[in-house]
Amino acid sequence: MALNDVLDRIDAELDAATERLMELLRIQSISTDPAYKAECDQAADWLVADLNSIGIKAEKRATPGHPMVVGHVGEDNTDVPHVLFYGHYDVQPVDPLELWNTPPFEPQLEDTPNGTVIRGRGASDDKGQLMTFVEACRAWKDVNGSLPCRITFFFEGEEESGSPSLIPFMEANADELKADIALICDTSMVSRGVPSISSQLRGMLKDEFTVIGPRIDLHSGHYGGPGLNPLRVLSEVVASFYDNDTGRVAVEGFYEGVHEVPEDQLRQWQNCGFDEAEYLNSVGYTRPHGEKAYSTLEQQWARPTLEVNGLWGGYNGAGSKTVIPSEAHCKITCRLVGDMDPDALRSKIRKHVEDRLPVDASVRWDNDLEGSPASVMNISRPEFEAARGALSDEWQREAVFCGMGGSIPIAGYFKSILDMDAMLIGFANDDDAIHSPNEKYDLKSFHKGIRSWARVLDALSRK
């Protein structure tokens, strides 16, 4: 099977591949809003039809929420590696609509100082990325009549709304979904033009609490002075989360399970092309504000955090209202690394808060618990080095193993439910504005992403 012929086919068919992506981008598959249920079904149907058109047996599978798309090819070929490719076809809401420069579901090509981009909701997260793999498979089939690996396709429709159907579906279909390794294309490159394989992902812990003071909101003239103000109590609790001298989280036991990054990996990160000044200045920062003993990349990829995501209480309307509020509210999230246990950490944070409440204050915790541990990939597997070599050949730049500051729970689910390692390879850029108005995907990322997957499939087939 001639790889160069496949790459030539990809180049020749780029316009057609781009138009297919545009078709998918026009479907308003917003999973979190029930008003778009039909559009999510439509996107799943579109993917089934597209996979079927290139000889892949695919079908839409019902769930209590939005459907899954599952496809298989090469089942009878047991002499080649079996890979599972995961992506998601649902997208984020487009609000605030007035900040879009073009209609979000009328995708178009646009020239920018960094080259041509595909502008539209889902272009980068994750339809454009998903289609890089599909288009690579299309070119392989067109040229060779078959694919170099046995492949299972697994497309989800609820990733942007918490994936409520994902775990039950994976558990119920574990035997069908099991493969040698999972490939995930829902990530970015560490910097523009630097091909990257994510080797670790931070986990996530969410919690919410309410500090309760007086039985009702009080007149601040009648009770100002003797009255305990929950907003003041909450402010003091939040301030106690942090050590301002070191930038560390001050919750006792917070860093249990955190490991230092090996020196050889740190050296690779230092040479990965990351521009700290550009990263910080692009959002209005002049310096990093995390743990002072660690670099910006370490803070982003390998260190845990506790962030306050929302604080509110009392009167927030126009003018003033002279009250001491009855309640004050706080939302927090933690990014987890290493072997941090989300359940154990939740208990430590709650104890930290409860130990700092004064007399006449109490706390009510949210019971909608959510948490997932960090994921660390087994980069000693030969597939990782094979993929790194393939990416390096395509981009003419050494590919790097990098970390990710965000959380992609599916990688952990592949391990915990299917006992599969996952390899995360994506071609997005940091300026793609995912989840924001004016989302885009570089046409170069789309084109070279397709070529990259063709090379990766070829490399994996030789393992």
Image (tube, rainbow, N blue to C red):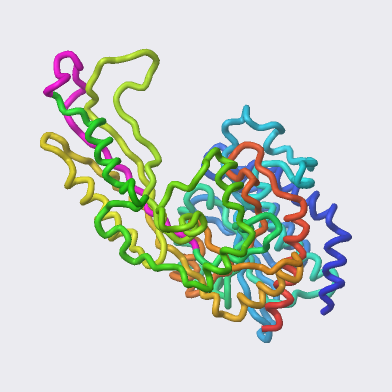
Magenta extent: 201-226
Evaluate whether residue 154 shows in this view. Answer: no
Residue 57, relative to residue 43: is it above or below? below
Q: Is residue 274 left or right of residue 73?
A: left
Residue drawn at (44%, 46%) of the image? 289
Q: Is residue 171 left or right of residue 86?
A: left
Q: Is residue 194 left or right of residue 241?
A: right
Counting every numbered tag in the picture gives: 0
Residue drawn at (83%, 56%) of the image? 14
Residue placed most toward the observer, 303 or 170: 303
Q: Is residue 161 magenta?
A: no
Residue 132 x, y percent position in the rendering: 72, 59
Q: Is residue 206 magenta?
A: yes
Residue 138 x, y percent position in the rendering: 78, 65
Residue placed most toward the observer, 220 or 77: 220
In the picture as drawn, the residue positioned furthest to the bottom comes out as 79
Residue 420, relative to residue 222: is it above or below? below
Q: Which corner quadrant holds the C terminus?
A: bottom right
Residue 371 x, y percent position in the rendering: 38, 56
Residue drawn at (71%, 83%) of the image? 462
Evaluate whether residue 278 shows in this view. Answer: yes
Q: Which corner quadrant holds the N terminus?
A: bottom right
Residue 64, relative to residue 362: is it above or below? below
Residue 20 x, y percent position in the rendering: 78, 51
Residue drawn at (65%, 42%) of the image? 439
Q: Is residue 326 left or right of residue 34?
A: left
Residue placed most toward the observer, 364 or 60: 364
